[in-house]
Amino acid sequence: MTIFQIECFLSVAEFLNFARAAEQMHVSQPAITRQIKSLEDELGTKLFIRNTRIVKLTESGQIFLADAHTMVSAAHRSVKRFAKKDTEKIIDFTIGCSNPLHMEQLIHTLHDLKKDYPTMHPNIRISAETHFSELLEQETMDIAIGFYTPTIPSSIHYKELKKAPFVCVMQQDMPLTSLKTIHKEDLTSYSMILYAPGSAAPSLIDSQWKWTADKKPSELYLCETAENILLLVHAGFGVALLPDIFIPKREDLVTAPLACKETISFGLYYKTVQQKPYLKRFIELLCHGTKKEE
């Protein structure tokens, strides 16, 4: 029996919902189900009655509930007691960032994390990595922020922060700026600036390239980064379709929503937050900061 298993039990007991408990614990729903099953096997009794309609505590679950609170509280007191003796501990964890334009939110979150760990000195290396599944698998990276891709290994968890809508980015003097929304046919006479294949999340590249079916190769400009795409738009080479979170506030560029209202999932990738309370707190702070922006 582990403290993590007991915390999973307490979370399910609080929400009486496995999906909400998994979200609170920053794990997938199957993962929290396995933890509860393992705990029930060890105790030799069912803790929850669950079917397609309800989840509720069994009589054994109600009895175990009070003991679970006591055990978790005692464990947390013990951790705090020993943490006070280690005031010079270095928190060393690596954050993968798929685009430097996301850095501002990360910096705010790290600043808030520092408030929660005033006697510790985070040594945080922020790596701009386009593909970070291997690094998370090898545990040389603890967490990454980027767009959802369905090809991630099953051992990697994904937590959505927001649905980012695509917008059309253009120079402020283009006739397109008079339109409230952009349809595919509105871009017929414009060159398009896109991510090069393999330079970003597949879901992001696929969403962009769907708009290029009628374009000649000479009407397409390919870039490796969002910054370079925006530079070409600013220089008048064409228009770009990007998630709105990529667009910094600047007077020289104008954005307009797409009529199709296409979005892309943006969030966090991580392998585990167990035994890393600072990492769990980082996720909570980043999620809270994202909700405040909406």
Image: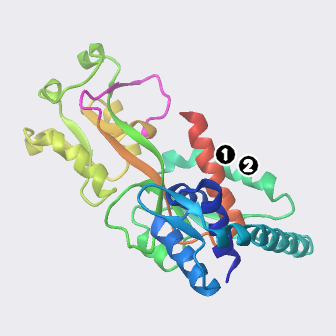
Residue 253: say if magenta: yes
Judged left or right of residue 139, residue 66 is right
Kindly identify the residue that appears in the image at 69 percent across and 58 percent down. 281
Q: Is mark 2 on a helix, strand or loop?
A: helix
Residue 163 in the image, given as x and y percentages of width and height: 41, 42
Quadrant of residue 208 within the rendered picture: top left
Q: Which of 91 and 29 lies nearest the eye of the viewer?
A: 29
Q: Residues within 10 Å of mark 2 (few under 14, many from 20)?
A: some
Residue 14 in the image, given as x and y percentages of width and height: 65, 56
Q: Which of 44 and 120 lies nearest the eye of the viewer?
A: 44
Q: Which amino acid does label 1 sit on?
A: His
What is the number of the mark on residue 121? none
The answer to whether residue 25 shows anywhere in this view is no
What is the number of the mark on residue 112? 2
The answer to whether residue 100 shows anywhere in this view is yes
Say if 145 sits above or below 263 in the image. below
Say if 175 sits above or below 205 in the image. above
Judged left or right of residue 154, residue 38 is right
Residue behind mark 1:
108
> By what rule are the colours in the image chosen?
rainbow
Kindly identify the residue that appears in the image at 19 percent across and 26 percent down. 183
Residue stretch in magenta: 246-261
Kindly identify the residue that appears in the image at 53 percent across and 56 percent down. 17
Q: What element carries label 1?
A: helix
Residue 248: say if magenta: yes
Quadrant of residue 65 within the rendered picture: bottom right
